[in-house]
């Protein structure tokens, strides 16, 4: 889709990556792995849930989500449900669980590297603080 949209826009148009984090609340959940208390800056309180870090591509007119990851907290004190110890460490599920507890800047770099590897390019990266 990115290659198709690039053909439709002017050659001098600036393409950007957009990084955004949003809270996915799971206030009714009781036994979800890696469920954490995350601070919601909209409501100014802690909520049970995850942080979804999304990488998107835009040409100024269109927005395409490229990649995302769900993040729990890397601090043990705010993590409500721990990772199950019965999971085989060679599986993709285990690798995703390990990725969940990494820091946002590390994951952001990984998301951008994955997009560039897939042939998606941009001149700038936009994000909030």
Image (spheres, rainbow, N blue to C red):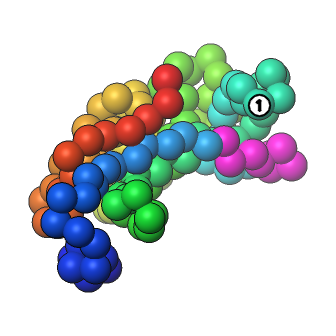
Q: Which residues are magenta?
A: 23-30
- Magenta: predominant secondary structure element? loop
Place residue 61 in its image quadrant.
bottom left
The residue shown at (34%, 29%) is 105
Residue 124, image x, y percentages: 26, 41
Of the pair 18 and 41, the residue shown nearer to us: 18
Within 10 Å of disc 1 (Cα), the crowding (few <14, some 14-19, many 20+) is: few
In magenta segment, residue 24: yes
User: Considering the numbered disc 1 on the image, is that residue within a helix, a strand or a loop?
Assistant: loop
Q: Judge by depth and name the residue closer to the eye, 62 or 46.
A: 62
User: Can residue 69 be seen?
Assistant: no
Q: Is residue 123 visible?
A: yes
Give how far across and how far down residue 60 sits, in percent: 40, 58
* Residue where numbered disc 1 is placed: 42
Quadrant hosting residue 121? bottom left
In the image, is 73 to the left or to the right of 121? right
């Amino acid at each position: 889709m990115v290659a198709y949209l690039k053909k439709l826009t002017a050659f001098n148009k600036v393409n950007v990556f957009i990084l955004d984090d949003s809270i996915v609340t799971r206030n009714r959940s009781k036994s979800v792995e890696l469920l954490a208390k995350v601070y919601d800056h909209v409501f100014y309180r802690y909520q049970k849930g995850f942080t979804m870090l999304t990488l998107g591509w835009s040409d100024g007119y269109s927005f395409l989500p490229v990649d995302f990851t769900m993040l729990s907290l890397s601090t043990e004190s705010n993590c409500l449900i721990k990772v199950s110890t019965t999971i085989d460490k060679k599986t993709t599920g285990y690798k995703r669980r390990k990725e969940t507890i990494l820091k946002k800047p590390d994951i952001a770099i990984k998301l951008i590297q994955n997009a560039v590897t897939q042939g998606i390019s941009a001149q700038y990266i936009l994000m909030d603080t």
